[in-house]
Image: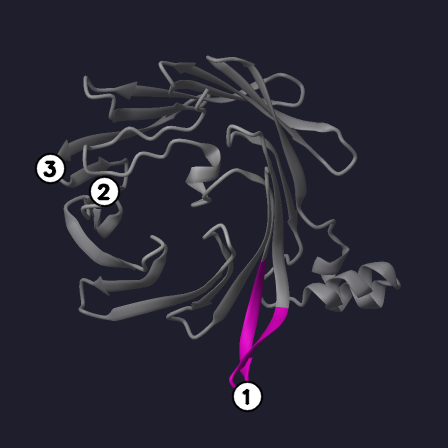
Amino acid sequence: MTILVLFASCSERIIVSDADSLGLRYKVKSMDESFYIAYNSFDSIVLEKKIYRYKYQFHYDCRYKSVEKNFYCCKPICDSMLCDSIVNVSKSDSLKQYFPFAYKDPEYYVVNYKYVSDSFVTLDFLDRQGNLINYINRKYANNRLIVEEKYSGQGNLILKSGFWYDSDNRLQNKTVFYENDYVETNYAYSTGEKFETGNEFNYRYKFDINGRISSKKTYKGIIFLSETSFYYNDYGDVVMQREVDKKGIIKKTQYEYAYDSGNNWILCVEYNYTGNIFVRKREITYYS
């Protein structure tokens, strides 16, 4: 059974599995991904602060088995090694005064996926001690997600999302219902384009011949805010994003990759338009 499928225009790439949604190729068994803030030193990239770590486990058919998240830094400016050392040393009031963030347990959860049937999946979110934080029930029809319900660990309904599709199996409407409110997003299509209309912001996407996003325009109501163009390498990974806002100011972000024998990237270096450098490292294992 395929769990995650995006039906959009005939020009938009269809995501056929959970592994595919992460851009992974071949039969991936597990992936350990870490994200760092880095800097340049004598033409070398030095990892400075570890921000988060994700550990993915996949079934043979590329569905999620579990996803574990460990968030190390409470703020981008904090040093994860410093945070860890303070937590493990002393918890005196004087240290708390200068490093209050260091005494918070790093954000952590693990999601276990339970495939009850071809049309029903449950996601259990567990804390570090294995306690149930909350859970999500997903209902499918013809491999399309039609209902998603989120509950607290005590079983109280937090929100409910409904998904509606057109005659071409393209997502037409998504509505999220809260206790006293709802948020609605509508989608419309033309050749090679998709239009997304929300409560506050609207988007217009264009796709290339491979179904990848080539440009994205952002509006607030009918007011144009920015246009972002996307450029890809031969592996289909983004190598540059170029954003131009309504004042003509350009923000450019570039990416460099290293790949393994399965053509999956295992190192991604992002040179952000803010001047920051971010690094993602992956360790990938495959089914034989």
| Front-lying residue, 118 or 130 | 118
Q: Nearer the viewer, mark 2 or mark 1?
A: 1
Q: Is residue 47 magenta?
A: yes
How many angstroms separate mark 2 from mark 3 (CA)?
Answer: 18 Å
Q: Is residue 192 above or below residue 42?
A: above
How many angstroms separate mark 2 from mark 1 (CA)?
Answer: 43 Å
Provide the residue span drawn in magenta. 35-48
**Element type at mark 1:** loop
Q: Amino acid at mark 2?
A: Asn
Name the residue carrying label 2. 202
Name the residue carrying label 1. 42
Res 228 → quadrant: bottom left
| Front-lying residue, 19 or 47 | 19
Q: Is residue 105 above or below residue 102?
A: above
Q: Residue at x 56, y 72 (%)?
A: 38
Q: Residue at x 66, y 23 (%)?
A: 153
Instruction: Say how the picture is coloured.
Output: one colour
